[in-house]
Image (cartoon, rainbow, N blue to C red):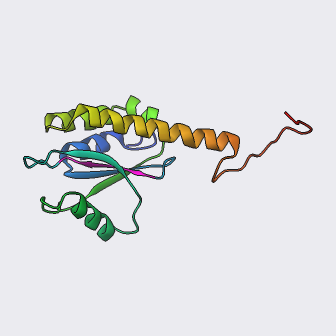
Amino acid sequence: MSDDYGVDLEEILRVIDRAAVLIVRFDVLEPRLLVDFRADPPDTPIIQLVDRVNSAEERFRHLKSLRPKLPLPERIMSFPWPRAVGAFEESGIWEKIETRLVSLGAEQERIDRIRQQLLDGERAVTVAAITGGEGFRTIWEREGSDE
């Protein structure tokens, strides 16, 4: 069932509960959010922003390079997020991810830093869209202004 967020929120929350590794694809941001809930002391769960890849095989290779001591997961779950990062938080998805990570031993400071990077990245994209920054062009420009 799709709700106000344009996704099946209940299904996403279920995926977060059972996924070993999760990728979130934000529409407005180039990097992906990687959440690896696996923990095998001294390795703790990780959360970080990662580049896009061209295939599932490439993602698995990248994951293996990040966590060489851990066996590869059976699958990597993924879902798109079509709304703003603020809506990701308002929906309860961020809290669900954060709660699970902390319960498995992840560092709160790291989680907070990634959250801020998402917000900062989205803000940078918004500013670029408004000002005609890289990857964007303005539709309207002020005429006759030398200011």
Residue at the spot 63% in from the left edge and 54% down from the top edge? 135
Left or right side of 43 for 58: right
Whether residue 121 appears in this view of the structure is yes
Q: Does residue 119 lie above or below 12 as drawn?
A: above
Q: Quadrant of residue 88?
A: top left
Magenta: main secondary structure equals strand
Q: Residue furthest top?
A: 90
Q: Does residue 25 lie above or below 102 as drawn?
A: below
Q: Which residues are magenta?
A: 31-37
Q: Nearer the viewer, residue 27 or 47?
A: 47
Q: Is residue 57 magenta?
A: no
Q: Quadrant of residue 45?
A: top left
Residue 9 x, y percent position in the rendering: 35, 39
Residue 25 x, y percent position in the rendering: 41, 51
Q: Quadrant of the N terminus?
A: top left
Left or right side of 67 for 139: right
